[in-house]
Image (tube, rainbow, N blue to C red):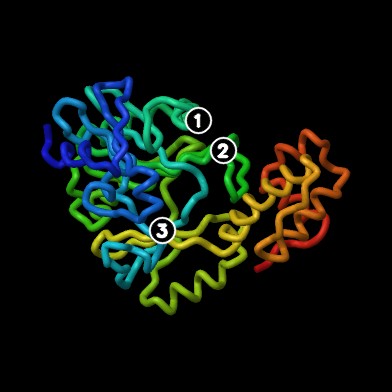
Amino acid sequence: MNSFTEKMLNSPYVVAKPQEDHNLISLNFSRKAFQKNIWNAQTIHARGLFVDATTGDVKMRSYNKFFYIDTDPTGEHLQFPAVAYKKYNGFLGIMSVVDGDIVIASKSTTQGPFKELFQEIWNTLDDDDVQTLKDLSEQNNCSFVFEVCHIDDKHIIDFNENHLYLLDAIPNTYNTAGITVDTQFSQAILQQVKPVSEALSLKEELCTFNNRAELDAYVDAHRNDHTLEGMVLVDNRGYMCKEKFLYYVKIKQLRGFLQSCIKAHFKGQPLPKPRQEFMSDIVDKVLHSDNFSDEELENLHVIDAVKYYEANFEELSF
């Protein structure tokens, strides 16, 4: 058994799940590690990681855990210049070739509902795209990491079509040859991917920031961006971090408040107090609307609540 994998299996902060496919075990940091901010060599690596149950060798993997800008507990910080890429509002998908077979997975399993959503979109890809990704994975012993955007799994940002965004190629080893990602390795491989499928595209670069002032100005200018979660930043060392736009942050806060208010409404209980006034206004308009039946209101998605509010009252601006 690979010694590093053995340490991860023995860590109280890593969750190991045997998989049905190809003698794999998935390793992911535990909820306790996340809640208590316990980040070490084991927990940082344990994110979308699949290893051979016998040898401990890496067979599929995603990025190491990375953090919001200026919050990395390891003490690392983003250096400039840094390239910014669009951060899509979906979920993590991983693809690799194991024992000659294409295997796709969500962050923690090769089975289950999220894998099935990923599989549904994967099955629509052109055969040439599938073969290219399979060949490159085998030739370079790497995994491909995707953002999976499925219309049945919307979160905060609205979209109308299923899509896979190919983010990076990552070697199937513990050593990424970069702090978070080996950018040279990934770019060399992604340059060979020329998608022809409508449901597949490469991640999109936003811009390059030469200093923190440029980055802050860009984030402020996009505070009301309704189309993106935010951005992922990568510096020349392959160090990654992320930043969320304010609209995304506010609507994510609204989501929990809206759900609590709807539950209280149907139980005849007083509504909880909002953290911010805009939340109360939206909830009030939604609860007193004739546009939603009781059944629709009970299952109302925050995206639909915001769309109703903006269509009938005013566009949200923060």
Mark 3: secondary structure: strand
The extreme right residue here reads 290
CB-based contact (under 8 Å), mark 2 and mark 1: yes
Image position, residue 127 (x, y; %): 40, 26
Amino acid type shown at disc 1: Leu
Q: Which is nearer the N-term, disc 2 or disc 3?
A: 2
Quarter of the image where the C terminus is located: bottom right
Please give the label number shown on residue 117: 1
- Can you identify the residue that label 2 sits on? 153
Q: Which residue appears at 59% of the width and 34% of the height?
A: 152
Structural crowding at the residue carrying mark 1, measured as other residues with C-alpha within 10 Å and reported as few (<14), some (14–19) or many (≥20)? some
Image position, residue 222 (x, y; %): 56, 67
The extreme bottom residue here reads 213
- Can you identify the residue that label 3 sits on? 232
The relative height of residue 262 versus residue 124 in the rendered view (above or below) is: below
Q: Would residue 232 appear left or right of 50 to someone viewing this image? A: right
Q: Would residue 138 appear left or right of 102 to someone viewing this image? A: left
Task: Report the Cα–Cα distance between label 1 and label 3.
Answer: 24 Å
> In front: mark 2 or mark 3?
2
Image position, residue 140 (x, y; %): 20, 38
CB-based contact (under 8 Å), mark 1 and mark 3: no
Whether residue 234 is visible, yes or no, is: yes
Quarter of the image where the N terminus is located: top left
Task: Report the Cα–Cα distance between label 2 and label 3.
Answer: 21 Å
Please give the label number shown on residue 206: none
Amino acid type shown at disc 2: Asp
Whether residue 192 is visible, yes or no, is: no
